[in-house]
Image (cartoon, grey):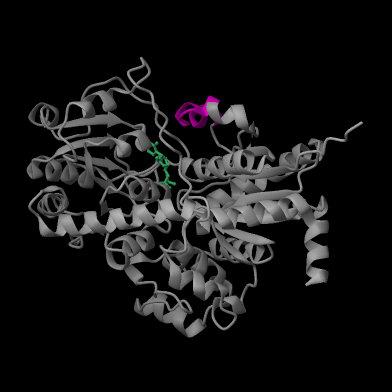
Amino acid sequence: MEVVPTKTRIALLASPGMGHLIPVLELGQRFATHHRCLVTIFVVTTDASTTQSQLPHYSSYRDLLDIVFLPPVDVSDLVTNSMAILSQLVLIMRHAMPILRTEIAELKPRPSALVVDLFGTEAFEIADDFGMLKYMFDTTNAWFLALSLYYPHQDETNKHDHVYLHKPLNIPGCAPLKFEDTIDPYLLPDDRVLHDDYVKMALDMARAHGILVNSWEYLEPKTLKALRDPNLLGRFSSVPVHPVGPLIRPVKPVGNSVCRSKVLDWLDSQPAESVLYVSFGSGGTLSADQLTELAWGLELSQQRFVWVVRPPMEGSAFGAYFHQNKRTEDGTPAYLPDGFASRTRDLGLVVEMWAPQTEVLAHESVGGFLSHCGWNSTLESVINGVPMICWPLYAEQGMNATMLSDHLGMATRPREVGPDGVIGREVIEKVIRRVMEKDEEHGKLVKAKVLDLKHSAEVALAKGGSSRGSLELVAKECVTGLTGLRERARGA
Ligand code: UDP
């Protein structure tokens, strides 16, 4: 009787937030379709039902993947208002570890590999105990990965000058980190919990069998080279780095079906590339003053727009990240300026809380994206050839904004911030016009740049492309498992 070989199972772990879950699902889907693996995805949430309802085409993922929502983690009694988002995520993930261990122990066949995102590296202990290969999937870019791997080993004088004198932080072989783009561990130098969490994360990822990154060779050649160079960042970690991106959720055709969003219907009746899409990711929020200025800036620019709005939040730029406010009834939200809806009725559409973003960005009427520069939003913009206006809010978004505007030239960033930290309406009006108006030279340049990057992304993902090849290599390692990897290392 012919013995049918058992398929390899790979387990993936996603931390809270759509920006982590979507790329993890996409990676899992590639393992299942291109490499015929069994894929189990463990999802950690603080609110599983909202996550499921926001996940577009959830059922089509379920057809291919075994998706396990772990019981929602409640750490509300341990979280303080001033706690950094990184520490909150680490805390939530830590609380999910015991149940994850039980779930993995029960899986048959036992997974040969565990792939976690940035916040799941504590699960490597479980992978070690079960003899699994361990991979970290960096759902952002190689530059942020470089900073993270460098963090525990950084030059103390350089760190001091960055934190207290606001000088750029030099990351070996990479573009320096400007203070205006810096991340929480440098903004909150006295937060020991945050420092320790970040160090642990970085040291954990350095002992993975491989790091996958949602980027591609053409986008970040210098940084990827530095990561692999034993005289630069390779000094701190010899983990192979595999750029496998851009992995984003593809647009699924919905035609004229009843579940088609009203945003898409509205976009259908607008001229090509005339609409600015405005959105701050899955959890970004603005202060009341900033929200008012943005509304006025949009109105003054006289450009068409779709704006995903959320109630204002003071003192936190990620106010809706863990706890989405439920949608309210349609109509102008009370927190927008008086009369905004009636004055912009023919110009724009306001959507509360959530929009089908990939479908919006793929729509031919959309010609620009004002974004918080979350990495998934960025990749979705590139893949659809949509130039961006950068409006970073938290985490590594400032770095992303600099990469997009200064290094890659596919975006514009408003620089003039008022003394109160608010970007004024005239600045907003100007930056929108620069990107959206057809006769603006700058708009043409950023458009050409984004189209070049779109093309390079398509090449990287196609058969024979660099990202496709990287993923094939990782999948092969997963199939041979720890034993295969050891045998190969002995033979080498
Ligand atoms: N997203 C969406 N609709 C929204 C807001 C966000 O579909 O109204 C999706 C978006 O397409 C992206 C993800 O949520 O895939 C947000 O990820 P990103 O990395 O851009 O930002 P984060 O939410 O992690 O800050």
Q: Which residues are magenta?
A: 48-59
- For the point 53% across and 55% down, which residue is it? 464
- For the point 17% across and 26% down, which residue is it? 269
- For the point 36% across and 32% down, which residue is it? 356
Q: Is residue 68 left or right of residue 313?
A: right
x and y percentages locating residue 308 in the rendered image: 29, 35
Q: Is residue 61 magenta?
A: no
x and y percentages locating residue 465 in the rendered image: 50, 56
Q: In the rendered image, which quarter is residue 330 located in? A: top left
x and y percentages locating residue 203 in the rendered image: 64, 67
- For the point 15% across and 54% down, which residue is it? 431
Q: Is residue 286 left or right of residue 234?
A: left
Q: In the rendered image, which quarter is residue 65 located in? A: top right
x and y percentages locating residue 147 in the rendered image: 49, 69
Q: In the rendered image, which quarter is residue 31 located in? A: top right
Which residue occupies the foreground of this view, 302 or 93? 302
Which residue occupies the foreground of this view, 206 or 151? 206
